[in-house]
Image: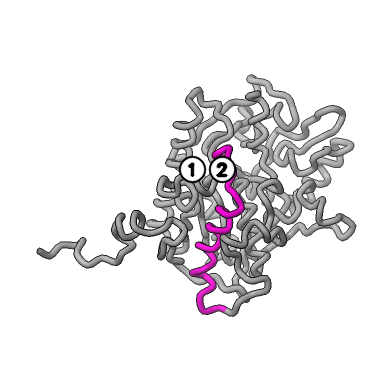
Amino acid sequence: MSNPYVGLPPRAYWRSGVADVSFLEMQDVYRPRYEISRESTRIAAAGSCFAQHIGRQFKARGYQFVDVEKPLPMLPESAWNDYGFNMYSARYGNLYSARQLLQMFRRAHGLFTPEEDVWEKNGRFYDPFRPNIEKNGYATPEEVRRDRDFHLAAVRRILEQTDVFVFTFGLTEAWECIADGAILPTCPGTVAGQFDPEKYRFVNFSYEDVLGDFTAFKEFAEGIRPGIRFLITVSPVPLTATASDQHVLPATVYSKSVLRTVCGTLYQKYENVDYFPSFELVSSHPGRAMFFRPNLREVSPVGVAHVMDAFFGPHTAGQAAPDPEPVSAEKAPARAKPRMSEDDLVCEEALLEEFGR
């Protein structure tokens, strides 16, 4: 009997593609939609905490990574994370949602000026949109504004230099300034600032919200850099806490389901959008949580290595091997540099755990 399911490759069937093979040895999970050349493709990155691994790995493997805010010469490498360097393509910290991403670039290009200006904590001052970029804060509000102006000027240069923009979707939950809709990376009163229910409200973005926000960013980027391509992923890291009045488990599943569905729509609709299944490679049930640390939230070094090998393997086929050589899962724990460990990640959302104790 003839039908479309006869004679498909092993990857198309659950038994041969998943059940009968080691989760570490699954083949053909990711097929790149376009080539990313180590020598000529300029790559920028942004997203949630897990995206820090991606940017670091592009650099470590010798790719042309766009970095418009490099560490100051006098700053030791051990302090880079404390000041937001070497994480992404600029010192914007974590961008957990597509609306954060869109608003940041609109701010950089003078199209949006939020009313929220400066936060204070214990006599130090913080940028509400980058509260963790200076862990000890700034000495004066004027320093916050000067550094923010310098930062946004740098952000303006990113898209015009970029061939592939990588974004890792992290969360659907966020905190919004009621006055103008500005999205904050963390709830006021956690890292810094003071929570006021008259000024801030909780939002949980829908599929339509996220799709609309990223589509708007995509069109904005294409207006600046015609021919730009996009690589999108979903972070496998679950919510630390939820303000949705749900149990954190279904709240996490809602968030990741929305984000994964958005990615599927973008991939199907646009030829210049590629999707890499980092979420599936870590979080899907055949993995039996083997790539998580004991808290079932943080991804282990072996898990990170597994994801990175699954991505870079297809992209480096036929290309000359770089120095350092690609990471293997077996070697992951011992190769601290230039890789970053989970303890090196800067993640405001993870701080919410402290409020549950």
Q: Residue 123 is drawn in which quadrant?
A: top right
Residue 95 x, y percent position in the rendering: 62, 45
Circle 1 residues within 10 Å: few <14, some 14–19, many ≥20: many
Identify whether 275 is placed above or below 39.
above
Quarter containing the C terminus: top right
How many angstroms separate mark 2 from mark 1 (CA)? 8 Å
Identify whether 213 is placed above or below 4.
above
Disc 2 is placed on an element classified as loop
User: Residue at left 45%, top 37%?
Assistant: 253
User: Residue at left 63%, top 48%?
Assistant: 106
Mark 2 and mark 1 in contact? Answer it, CB < 8 Å: yes
Identify whether 45 is placed above or below 238.
below
Q: Considering only order in the chain, which callout, 1 or 2, is on the residue closer to the N terminus?
A: 2
Q: Residue 324 is drawn in which quadrant?
A: bottom right
User: Residue at left 47%, top 32%?
Assistant: 249
Quarter containing the N terminus: bottom left
Q: In the drawing, does residue 13 fall left or right of residue 96?
A: left
Report which residue position mark 1 lands on: 210
Residue 4 x, y percent position in the rendering: 19, 62
Q: Is residue 111 visible?
A: no
Residue kind at label 1, given as amino acid type = Val
Which stretch did the figure color magenta? 293-319
Give whichever of 48, 305 is nearer the camera.
Answer: 305
Report which residue position mark 2 lands on: 97
Disc 1 is placed on an element classified as helix
Q: Is residue 158 magenta?
A: no
Identify whether 247 is placed above or below 154.
above
Q: Is residue 278 visible?
A: yes
Q: Is residue 294 magenta?
A: yes
Give whichever of 7, 187 is nearer the camera.
Answer: 7
Residue kind at label 2, given as amino acid type = Ser
